[in-house]
Image (cartoon, rainbow, N blue to C red):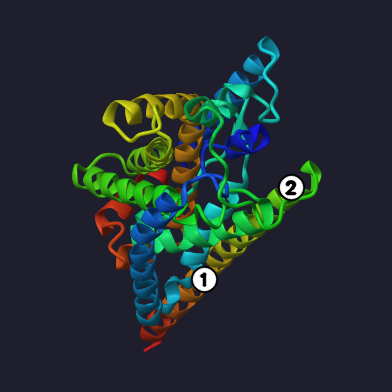
């Protein structure tokens, strides 16, 4: 089986990781999203007059809990993905084996006749 | 106030924060999104009734959106942002059903993560669940018709669909917050370029990675379950055989 696509994806991921390490070590950007460049845009445009019309019903009480919930979301998704891809793989494998048996039977019967 | 303005992006250009669209725009985007979600639910019911065997595939497409939209990755300008993962669903099931899947993820994030919001749900569904997937779907169909390499088409459809999501989010924000406070074309353009500038740097590399990962997932689905994709007219039999022949 060809692994060409895997290699291409791996290369892209490495390039992405490399640019991240390069940028994060050469600039002092804070990777918490504390960059005030995007932060000020709406304030800058409206002159700080806009008041949000609603607030979130509930906010994660800390950054750690927010990360936990993000991780939970990823885990649920990854679990479902793995389960069904594994299910299909095993099913196909099993069906193939079964298929060979069923096919070989009538043939051998014919030979014996 | 500054705190909330900062929260809109919280380094995350995907969703518009709770409360950060004036009421009139919330209504406009809901009015556009609700019919599409309704159509999606209708199509979903019909599809599940006709072909129960697609359920696992539907779960895979939904789960992919779940995983990808939870991956907040740091990006070039120092903010975080995350991929959308809607390309797979759009290619397999079409944009309307993908809108339903996206809505589920957006509600989860709005309720538990204060990420996006319920008032801005309509706007966020429109950008992430409708425009992105529609573009992905169209690019996929056109690319397959042009007989380009299948994985390349998936990559292209997903990446461009992802970019479209951010461009639409910028548009929604610029329409609500045009420069000079009154909605004029120049004011819109000025705000739009400001929002897009933030998003472009963050999203360009992420969308490329997302496109690559989506193509890889498609490879695995084809390996184990290509018959169902052929049956759903996602792929033609000849294409499957060609891919199989190449990767065998």
Whether residue B51 appears in this view of the structure is: yes
Write down the residue under mark 2. A66
Write down the residue under mark 1. A97
Quadrant of the rendered structure where residue B226 is?
A: bottom left
Q: Residues within 10 Å of mark 2 (few under 14, many from 20)?
A: some
Does residue B203 appear left or right of residue B235 in this picture? right
Quadrant of the rendered structure where residue A40 is?
A: top right
x then y, percent, for residue A10: 56, 32
Describe the element under mark 2 as helix, strand or loop.
helix
Q: CA distance from mark 1 to mark 2?
A: 47 Å
Does residue A14 appear left or right of residue A46 in this picture? right
For the image, the number of numbered tags is 2
Of all residues, the one furthest to the top in this rendering is A26
Sequence-wise, the earlier of marks 1 and 2 is 2
Of all residues, the one furthest to the bottom in this rendering is A113
Describe the element under mark 1 as helix, strand or loop.
helix
x 36%, y 60%: residue: B31
- Specify the label residue B228 is tagged with: none
Does residue A30 appear left or right of residue B73 in this picture? right
Above or below for B248 versus B8? below
């Amino acid at each position: 089986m060809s692994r060409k696509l895997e290699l291409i994806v791996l290369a892209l991921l490495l390039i992405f990781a490399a640019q991240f390490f390069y940028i994060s070590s050469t600039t002092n950007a804070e990777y918490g999203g504390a960059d005030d460049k995007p932060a000020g845009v709406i304030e800058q445009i409206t002159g700080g007059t806009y008041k949000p019309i609603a607030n979130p019903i509930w906010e994660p009480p800390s950054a750690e809990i927010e990360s936990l919930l993000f991780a939970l979301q990823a885990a649920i998704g990854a679990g479902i993905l793995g389960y069904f891809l594994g299910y299909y793989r095993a099913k196909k494998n099993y069906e193939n084996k079964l298929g060979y048996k069923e096919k070989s039977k009538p043939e051998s019967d014919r030979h014996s006749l | 106030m500054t705190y909330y303005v900062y929260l809109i992006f919280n380094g995350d250009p995907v969703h518009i924060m709770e409360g950060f669209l004036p009421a009139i725009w919330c209504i406009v985007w809901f009015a556009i999104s609700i019919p599409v979600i309704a159509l999606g639910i209708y199509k979903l019911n019909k599809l599940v009734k006709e072909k129960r065997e697609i359920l696992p595939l539907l779960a895979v497409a939904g789960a992919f959106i779940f995983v990808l939209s939870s991956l907040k990755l740091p990006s070039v300008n120092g903010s975080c942002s995350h991929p959308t993962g809607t390309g797979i669903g759009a290619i397999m099931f079409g944009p309307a059903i993908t809108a339903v899947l996206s809505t589920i993820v957006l509600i989860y994030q709005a309720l538990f993560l204060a990420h996006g919001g319920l008032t801005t749900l309509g706007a966020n569904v429109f950008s992430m669940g409708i425009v992105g997937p529609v573009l992905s779907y169209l690019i996929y169909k056109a690319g397959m018709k042009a007989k380009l390499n299948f994985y390349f088409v998936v990559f292209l459809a997903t990446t461009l669909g992802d970019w479209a999501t951010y461009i639409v989010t910028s548009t929604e924000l610029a329409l609500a917050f045009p420069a000079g406070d009154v909605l004029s074309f120049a004011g819109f353009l000025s705000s739009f370029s400001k929002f897009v500038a933030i998003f472009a740097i963050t999203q360009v590399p992420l969308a490329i990675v997302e496109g690559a990962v989506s193509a890889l997932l498609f490879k695995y689905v084809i390996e184990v379950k290509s018959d169902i994709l052929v049956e759903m007219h996602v792929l033609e039999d000849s294409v499957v055989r060609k891919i199989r022949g190449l990767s065998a």
